[in-house]
Image: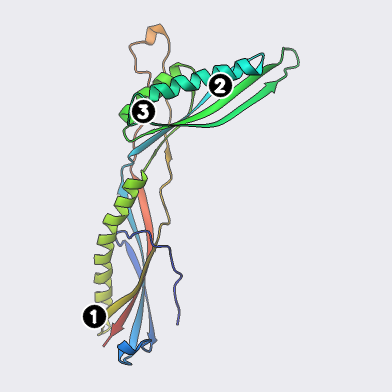
Amino acid sequence: MTLLPSFKSMGLVALASGMAVLAHTPAAHAEDNKEPYTRLEIHATGTTEAAPDKLSARFRAESQNKNAASAQGGVNAVVKKATDEAAKNADIKAAVLQYSVYETRPEKASPYWTASQTLSFSATDGKNLLPLAGQLQAKGLILEGLDWSLSDEKRQSLFLEAEKKAIIELKKQADTLAQSLGLHVARFTQISVSDQGYPHPMPIMLRAAVAGAANDSLDASPSSTAETQTVRADLRAIVLLEP
């Protein structure tokens, strides 16, 4: 008797393709009344597409000075201004991350210190975050990347919605195969799903902020497009068929 590997249950998605394997096995429990069952093993892959609802921006703040204390003070001031600005919008979440300080000794110049810190900002609406990104660029912060992704809440909601569709499709497939064999579906004994193909954040092409008095009338914010992402799940189910 061949068993398929178990997968961590994460929710189900709409059935897109299927594979069935049949095997004859005697009843395993007394309640089966010792009647032979045909074991039906189904494999299905489902996908669901959705627009991402979370935009993240990664920045790096740097400050250089001939002594370490001044360099650190400079970068600390820049980071504080950035987080204070982000706090004005409740939709924007800020995280202050890695911090580093190091000395550089050029061959034909005086040594100097560099203090650096990375920051991350996220929001559910790009209209809130993109203007802030432009402001921080104009203040000297380095925008290292913008990423669209699905929030945990939306991803879970998509899996739960797809789960209902998958159960309907599983029943249809099991009934169709059973009828073609002159049998009936007794019950499902196992249903499991893996979250393979979980969508990763999608990087966005950046447009540099416009600076200078002559360009004050232009939009200095970076641009972005929230492209549709695909959620995929591999589903396996075991069904017992009876005469």
Q: Which residue is mark 2?
A: 62
Q: CA distance from mark 1 to mark 2?
A: 69 Å
Can residue 110 be seen?
Answer: yes
- Depth check, mark 1 against mark 3: the one in front is 3
Which one is in front, 72 or 3?
A: 72
Q: CA distance from mark 2 to mark 3?
A: 21 Å
Measured from the top left, where is residue 143 in percent x and y? 47, 26
The first of marks 1 and 3 along the sequence is 3
In the rendered image, which quarter contains the C terminus?
bottom left
Are there few (<14), some (14-19), or many (20+) residues within 10 Å of tag 2?
A: many
Please tell me in which quadrant of the rendered image residue 37 appears.
bottom left
Q: Residue 135: image x %, image y %? A: 40, 19
> Where does label 1 land, which residue?
179
158 displayed left or right of 100: left
Type of the residue with mark 3: Leu
Indicate the position of residue 103 as horizontal and vertical percent values: 69, 22
Q: Residue at x 71, y 15 (%)?
A: 111
Q: Secondary structure at mark 2?
A: strand
- Side of 51 relative to 145 (left or right): left
Image position of 122 (left or right of 105):
left
Neighbour tally class for label 3: few under 14, some 14-19, many 20 plus, Cα within 10 Å: many
227 w.r.t. 130: above or below:
below
Secondary structure beneath dot 3 equals helix
> Mark 1: which amino acid?
Gln
Quadrant where the N terminus sits is bottom left
**Is mark 1 in CB contact (under 8 Å) with mark 3?**
no
